[in-house]
Image (spheres, helix red, strand yellow):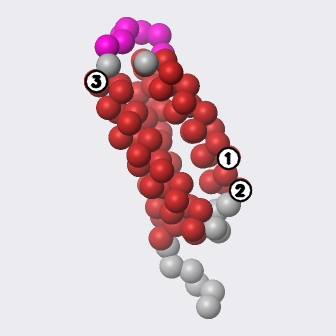
Amino acid sequence: MFQTFFWILAIWFIINVIWMWFQLNNQSLQKTFAWVNVVAVVIGFWVYYGVTHDAGGIAPWFLTMNWVNVVIAIIQFYFGYRKSNSL
């Protein structure tokens, strides 16, 4: 279960980052991805702390990816909810 969720979240992370950088001015998409990312972060931390796993292996990468997703979500919320200067 641990590795399965790791790979699902890793694929989401890659897709999320690629679309985020190519669509920085699309506020609707940024909001949607930010909220989906919040769900991914909650699931990621729940799996990391709720499922037994080895201390080594992919566990440190899983935790690192979760924290990077937190930062990405913050950036997406910024770009999604910032005020536009154009009328």
The dot on residue 50 is 3
* Pair 2/3: label in front: 3
Q: Which residues are magenta?
A: 52-58
Q: Residue at x 36, y 12 (%)?
A: 53
Q: What residue does disc 1 label?
A: 18
Q: Residue at x 57, y 39 (%)?
A: 13
Image position, residue 58 (x, y; %): 48, 16
Q: Do tag 2 and tag 1 residues touch (Cβ < 8 Å)? A: yes
Apparent side of residue 26 relative to residue 72 in the rendered image (left or right): right
* Pair 1/3: label in front: 3
Q: What residue does disc 2 label?
A: 22
**First in sequence: mark 2 vs mark 3:** 2
Image position, residue 48 (x, y; %): 35, 25
**Callout 1: 10 Å neighbours few (<14), some, many (20+)?**
few
- Image quarter where the C terminus lies is bottom right
Is residue 70 highlighted in magenta? no
Q: Residue at x 56, y 61 (%)?
A: 30
**First in sequence: mark 1 vs mark 3:** 1
